[in-house]
Amino acid sequence: MVVGTTGVTAADVLAVARGAARVELSEDAVAALGAAREIVDALAAKPEPVYGVSTGFGALATRHISQEMRAQLQRNIVRSHAAGMGPRVEREVVRALMFLRLKTVCSGRTGVRPTVAQTMADILNAGITPVVHEYGSLGCSGDLAPLSHCALTLMGEGDAEGPDGVVRPAGELLATHGIEPVELREKEGLALLNGTDGMLGMLIMALADLDTLYKSADITAALSLEALLGTDKVLAPELHDIRPHPGQGASAANMLAVLKGSGLTGHHQGDAPRVQDAYSVRCAPQVAGAGRDTMAHARLVADRELSSAVDNPVVLPDGRVESNGNFHGAPVAYVLDFLAIAAADLGSIAERRTDRLLDKNRSHGLPPFLADDAGVDSGLMIAQYTQAALVSEMKRLAVPASADSIPSSAMQEDHVSMGWSAARKLRTAVDDLTRIIAIELYAATRAIELREGLTPAPASRAVIDAVRAAGVQGPGPDRFLAPDLEAADAFVRGGHLVAAVEPVTGPLA
């Protein structure tokens, strides 16, 4: 993965964070780093104070720092800001954070020396992952504590995880891999800490996961519609063309593709007439579609951030070093919160369809709780409880973090974004949504198999065959249910549900 001066793509971030892709600096990045450093060095030699170069930081920015104390200043800011607490953050998040900070450094707008950038790349390539903790970022002046823990590793201090998964002192790990610790100079400590890299990395990974989950939700919604003998007429493209939200049209098209050739859809019309299906069935494209459109907006924000150089102060092409507020996480924090809201609603509507499948008064002929011998067997009763508990948690996680602000740094940083917190809760919400969709999948496939004498759509048959081959059992007497649900979760989480359908339907939108 070659990092230049113009930013990186979401695919690049995923390749480094999740795929362990190697990182190299482009020639233009090295040249830009050198040119910007010359500007910083020239300013550092002048008697006039320049923020971040020859002053303190934050509320202490009024103090001019003498040249002999500046190396100590850079070390101190990293050490003092590496103040995170709580559980360790996942390896992929830390790798994304490190790579995105390297991306900004390579823009030539931070004044960092080429050797610092190369050492950052070397640490990534060695598979060394700094220990970063859950708490410590307010999402303003960047993800300060998380980035500081990464910068500490660059200095050969603190703890890090090696490629073998063992946590050791960072200095030992660097030595093992032949990497020299960095002695930070003017501006460099600050430049390594000032960025939205943690929240942006988590946004990019959440978008990748949600892309699969929204396709999966379209599939399970179609399976539930089929199991409930619903009508697919509401999915007709001409109906969605008159309300032209792109996401809605895409979701409806996905569901229609899954249901093509079904012998179950509309079957109820001759037996037990229904004027309309319930909202959770009929409005599935509208809800999932709104979430898809929210994702499109979030991608736009992420792409803009990926092409940005977030630091304070920044080195401008005309040689000025200027302070700014570009480190504020509001743009990223808002869409992280918005995605959590959309995901919660998608989970909620999926749970309502599952509940309908289990209720004999609303399932149109299915046995109570899809049980083998209702009364003796409880069927999927408690699977729905689990799903409901997950939905309830997702609703709590949908409360925006970005609506909060706690002033810090002696009121110098008096309005913060809480974007890191928004990102952390979104990751939990994505996990919960995966499990909710897995439970709907489990219920819907069982319900379709219980519709004896009726032929499901070819795509539905492909899903049932694939999920059974993956160890998720079908109808029958009560059994230890947790392993089945875990297998269904792994099936959805690994993208296997989408993979089972697309050979029949073609690529889903």
Image: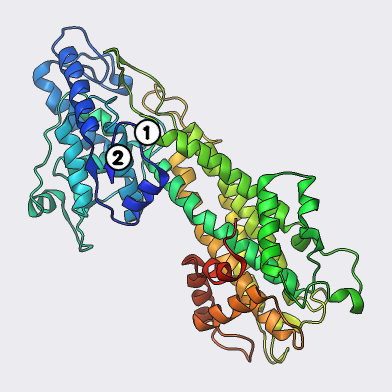
Q: Earlier in the sequence, mark 2 or mark 1?
A: 1
425 shown above or below 492: above
Task: Please report the residue visible at 28 percent of the width from the left and 55 percent of the height from the top.
Answer: 20
Out of 328 and 492, give the one closest to the viewer.
492
| SS at badge 2 | helix
| Corner quadrant of residue 383 | bottom right
Q: Residue at x 15, y 17 (%)?
A: 41
| Secondary structure beneath label 1 | loop
Q: Is residue 2 left or right of residue 402?
A: left
- Height in image: 501 above or below 192? below
Q: Which residue is mark 2?
A: 147
Say which quadrant the C terminus sits in.
bottom right
Identified at 11% across, 41% down, the residue is: 181
Quarter-wise, where is residue 318 in the image? top left
Q: Residues within 10 Å of mark 2 (few under 14, many from 20)?
A: many
Viewed as shown, does residue 212 lie left or right of 198? right
| Kind of residue sitting beneath label 1 | Gly
Q: Position of residue 372 (x, y in %)?
A: 69, 90
Q: Where residue 179 sits in the image (x, y, percent)?
A: 10, 46
Toward the viewer: 200 or 88?
A: 200
Q: Which mark is residue 142?
A: 1
Spatial CA distance of label 2 from label 1 is 8 Å
Label 2 close to label 1 by CB (< 8 Å) = yes
On residue 90, the disc is none
Q: Nearer the viewer, residue 379 or 100?
A: 100
Q: Amino acid at mark 2?
A: Leu
- Using a 10 Å C-alpha cutoff, classify the residue at mark 1 as few (fewer than 14 neighbours), some (14 to 19) or many (20 or more): many
The colour mode here is: rainbow
